[in-house]
Structure formats: C-alpha cells, structure tokens
Image (cartoon, rainbow, N blue to C red):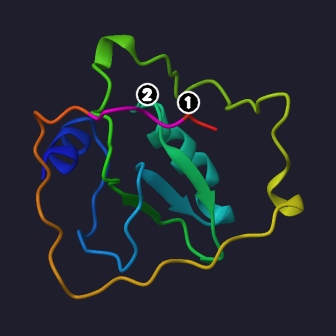
C-alpha cells in the first residue's frame, strides 16, 4: 500500500495492515492518550487528517484511510523538528478533558491497496 511504503521510508514503523468495519469519508488517525505525541508527529506528514482520541491503553495509532484521502506531503515541505517539543493550538483542550471514542475493531481481511494516483475531490479541515 502506498501510504505504508512512504511512511516506512521516512522511518515510521508499521506493525499491521487491516480492514476496519466502518467506512470513513476522510482519513483518520485514531490513538489513545499514550499515543498523542506520536499521532501528532505522524500528522505532520499529511496536509489534513482527522485526529480522534480513543480509549486504547497503548501507544499504537490506527491510520484509517478514508474514501477521500490526501497523499503524504513531500518531505521538503514538512515543518517538523523532533528536537522541539510539540505545542498545542490555542483552542486545543487537554486530553484529560476529552471523552475518548471507543477504539475500532479490526477484522481479519486484508486492506485493499489504494491508488496512489487518485487525488481526493476535497479535503477535511487541516490537522486538528
């Protein structure tokens, strides 16, 4: 799958690829409180993706490719420095003030590879 190849080339670790029972319109990163920093680090690779805090207890992140998805950004436009701490947006609520969603349930089916040449018709709001 195109996203997996690009992310692995950039040093991200992909443990598994599965199909989820729910279809989403736009791509999502789903993660628990222990995965917040990693999820927002991963989000720097995309122009727009929905960030969903769920109730998982580990550091894993689920990347759910939506029906309308964005390709990863070119590396030369990514503005991220791992040596600098992440900062919150002014209207961002602390994680302990949010009600996490229920973590999704994977199935045993393989994820179909998406067409890397297909552009989305429209994008979700920028990373939130």
Tell whether 20 sits left or right of 111: right
Foreground residue among 4 and 12: 4
Residue 13 at what x, y percent from top left? Answer: 30, 54
In three-dimensional space, the C-alpha distance between marks 1 and 2, rounded to whole angstroms, equals: 6 Å
Look at the picture and state if 75 lies above or below 27.
Answer: above
Foreground residue among 118 and 48: 118
Disc 1, SS: loop
Farthest residue in the bottom direction?
108
Farthest residue in the front direction?
121
Disc 2, SS: loop
Residue at label 2?
47
> Looking at the rendering, which quadrant does residue 87 occupy?
top right
Q: How many marks?
A: 2
| Earlier residue among tags 1 and 2 | 2
Farthest residue in the top direction?
76
Residue at label 1?
126
């Amino acid at each position: 799958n195109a996203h997996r190849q690009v992310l692995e080339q950039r040093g991200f670790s992909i443990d598994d690829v599965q199909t989820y029972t729910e279809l989403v319109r736009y791509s999502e990163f789903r993660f628990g409180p222990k995965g917040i920093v990693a999820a927002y680090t991963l989000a720097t690779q995309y122009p727009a993706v929905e960030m969903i805090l769920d109730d998982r207890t580990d550091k894993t992140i689920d990347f759910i490719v939506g029906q309308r998805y964005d390709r990863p950004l070119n590396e030369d436009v990514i503005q991220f420095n791992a040596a600098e701490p992440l900062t919150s947006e002014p209207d961002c609520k602390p994680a302990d003030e949010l009600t996490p969603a229920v973590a999704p349930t994977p199935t045993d089916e393989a994820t179909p590879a998406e067409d890397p040449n297909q552009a989305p018709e429209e994008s979700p709001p920028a990373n939130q």
